[in-house]
Image (cartoon, helix red, strand yellow):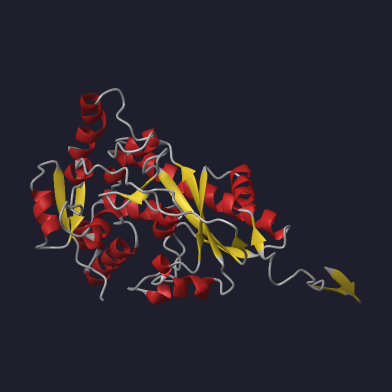
Amino acid sequence: MVRNGNSYQPAPDNSPTVGPKQLAAKDLRRLCLEAGADDVGFVDIGRPALDHERNDILAAYPRTRTIICLVIHLNPENMRSQARHLSSDEFHHATDTVATVGRNILRRLNALEVRGTIEPADFPMDMGRLPGKMWNVSHKIMAVEGGLGHMGLNRLVIHPQFGNFIRMTSLLIDTELDVYGSPLEHSLCDRCGLCLSVCPVGAIQRNAPFDFMACMTHAYRDNFIGFMDMLDSLLRSPDMDAFRQRFSDREIASMWQSLMYKMNYRCGYCMAVCPAGQAGHFCGSKKDFLQEVLLPLKNRKEQVYVLADTEAEKRAQTNPNKEIRRIGFSIRR
């Protein structure tokens, strides 16, 4: 800032509007790791695999030449815990960490006359595009294209070292690299089916598309759909007693907690039971793993949220430990 009379005016911006023509990928990788990333991948904006993503990326940052995908490792034991608030807390801390790391990287790159933006790991998103695609950068696609792993049967990216216990975000920069990443030759997912067996709503199938709506309706219950369902019920109820017949105190408290702090994820079991990658390997033996991780989650007594008369409801009905909760609100497409 510079003084102009009795007021302050912004100093003239003499920094360049474009960065150097090219960076060395090995130097950029070292910079990212020193800033706190656990792994990093690089993707060029022009590759054909981004044909369906490019317009959204350029809408976020028109000068994009390179996408940097950052990975932060989650603690597997938090994600596997039966105390599910531990997994939600781990997820949110990793989200904060990867955002901080991304901004540290951008500040270092700014000093090298490289400019760019960071895309949130999840929220906030562009709710003005609801119910369509609300994000500009698909981090999973960037991770796959950058050589950080492949998506497994559970639709999560499986990293060779960290398994599916990762949090990702993407940086968009205005500079090209000398070398870019490419997808790994092989997927670490051997389709063992543990994620399929533990999913309370049957969102994962071997020979059918992932049921995104079933997953979102339950796992993201305390997000937009659940909030609107609760709001709709509140407005339709003649009094508070009628409302509390529809929603228990536990459900109201869970929604309050998500609104006051950060969202409570009601599932994530598919991540918890995945044994792929070095970090996801069975703890001791497969038998011990099933007893200590899979079965306690599969048989956990809990409410499961479904749309009425769906395959998700049929799946939930097969488990006597699940209390079926039909929701009255869904996104209008």
Q: Can you say whether 253 is above or below 328 in the image?
A: above
| Nearer the observer, 166 or 51 | 51
Q: Position of residue 128 (x, y in %)?
A: 42, 76
Residue lying at 64% horizontally and 49% vertically, measured from the top left: 27
Residue 221 image-quadrant placement: bottom left
Residue 203, horizontal then vertical, whole percent: 20, 54
Please name the residue shown 37% across and 54% down the image: 256
Residue 136 image position (x, y, % from top left): 45, 68
Q: Position of residue 75 (x, y in %)?
A: 43, 36
Q: Is residue 253 left or right of residue 211?
A: right
* Left or right, residue 22 beside residue 119: right
Question: Which residue is painted at 33% across and 35% down in the image?
Answer: 81
Q: Nearer the viewer, residue 184 or 257?
A: 184
Quadrant in the rendering for residue 118: bottom right
Where 35 sits versus 286, above or below?
below
Q: Quadrant of the N terminus?
A: bottom right
- Taking the view exactly as shown, the residue that stands out farthest to the top is 284
**Which quarter shows the C terminus?**
bottom left
Residue placed farthest to the right in the image? 5
* Tally of marks: 0
In front here: 220 or 133? 133
Residue at (15, 55) in percent of width and height: 207
